[in-house]
């Protein structure tokens, strides 16, 4: 059974609007489509960040972001404890710190992570150029900082970066490349997707993320898809995944039977056209689950 957990958070991003992403995905018919596919679910509603909170030039709104991620950590951990599969609806991608670390901590074993994204999100508070926290969660999840993003108690576990795979990257900061290489994260760029084919990329990604792990947490940023297909995102990058490639990713994940939990993030209905991005996100979720 699926636990739907929304997070109304856009403080990690430079543009406002992704806090309405959970509502947009629901409005696109998520629950109806899950039901039509025979997938049982409970909608737990949305988590909200605290108003105000401390901020820093290199970590904007960090206090409110860390607070809502702590709430999400507890929700996801409790969901798993009840035998559910957590589905987290973002919100900006900083919410993955709460969800992924909760999954790793619950299983108390190493898990893998597949990060479908145009960006690496592998900055910390020292390497960041923008100070936007949604550019930091994968680094935190892999134990590379910022430490404050994953200090959730319960002996929170990070994920071995050698079991972390990015798919579809095409806008990686200069300072992120040496950090990714040093940590041992595997990056399949959009050029790799085009040269190797998405099926081969996903085969390798799943092998890496599942090697000596209990299963895989999937964090799917809808800006991995080309803006011509998914216009409703705050940080669009040209030359992204085609619609067919986006669904090939989903089908490969489903076929692997290794998905423990799922994030779908960065849908911005303010920038969307005819709810196309929200509908795409909804259909990708249904395909994976």
Image: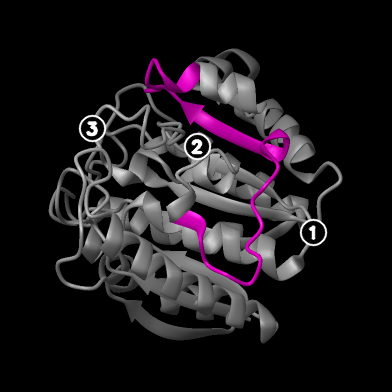
With 284 as the anchor, is 275 left or right in this view?
left
Which one is earlier in the sequence, the residue at label 2 or at label 3? 3
Within the image, what quadrant is residue 163 found in?
A: top right
Judge by depth and name the residue closer to the eye, 194 or 70.
Answer: 70
Q: Nearer the viewer, mark 1 or mark 2?
A: 1
What residue did someone put label 1 on?
Answer: 109
Seen in the picture, residue 139 relative to 238 is either above or below; the reply is: below
Within the image, what quadrant is residue 185 found in?
A: top right
Which one is earlier in the sequence, the residue at label 3 or at label 1? 1
Q: Which region is colored magenta? A: 149-177
Q: Position of residue 17 (x, y in %)?
A: 17, 56
Q: Position of residue 117 (x, y in %)?
A: 45, 37
- Circle number at residue 130: 3
In space, the residues marked 1 and 2 are separated at their CA atoms by 34 Å
Judge by depth and name the residue closer to the eye, 217 or 43.
Answer: 217
Mark 2 element type: helix
With 190 as the anchor, is 268 left or right in this view?
left
What residue did someone put label 2 on?
Answer: 244
Which one is earlier in the sequence, the residue at label 1 or at label 2? 1
Seen in the picture, residue 114 relative to 88 is either above or below; the reply is: above
């Amino acid at each position: 059974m699926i636990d739907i957990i929304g997070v109304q958070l856009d403080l990690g991003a430079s543009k406002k609007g992704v806090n309405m992403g959970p509502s947009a995905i629901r409005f696109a018919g998520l629950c109806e489509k899950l039901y039509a596919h025979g997938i049982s679910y409970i909608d737990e509603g949305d988590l909200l960040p605290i108003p105000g909170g401390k901020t820093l030039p290199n970590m904007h709104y960090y206090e409110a972001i860390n607070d809502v991620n702590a709430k999400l950590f507890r929700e996801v951990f409790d969901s798993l404890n009840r035998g559910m599969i957590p589905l987290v609806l973002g919100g900006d991608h900083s919410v993955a710190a709460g969800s992924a670390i909760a999954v790793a901590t619950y299983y108390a074993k190493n898990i893998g992570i597949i990060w479908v994204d145009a960006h690496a999100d592998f900055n910390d508070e020292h390497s960041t150029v923008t100070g936007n926290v949604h550019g930091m969660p994968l680094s935190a999840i892999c134990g590379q900082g910022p430490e404050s993003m994953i200090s959730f108690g319960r002996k929170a576990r990070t994920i071995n970066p050698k079991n972390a795979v990015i798919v579809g990257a095409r806008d990686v900061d200069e300072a992120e490349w040496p950090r990714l290489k040093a940590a041992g994260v595997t990056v399949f760029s959009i050029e790799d997707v085009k040269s190797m084919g998405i099926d081969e990329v996903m085969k390798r990604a799943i092998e890496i993320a599942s090697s000596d792990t209990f299963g895989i947490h999937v964090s799917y940023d809808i800006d991995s898809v080309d803006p011509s297909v998914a216009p409703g995102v705050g940080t669009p990058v040209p030359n992204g995944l085609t619609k067919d490639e986006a669904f090939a990713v989903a089908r490969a994940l489903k076929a692997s039977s290794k998905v423990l939990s799922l994030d779908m993030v960065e849908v911005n209905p303010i920038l969307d056209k005819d709810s196309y991005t929200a509908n795409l996100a909804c259909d990708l979720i249904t395909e994976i689950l």
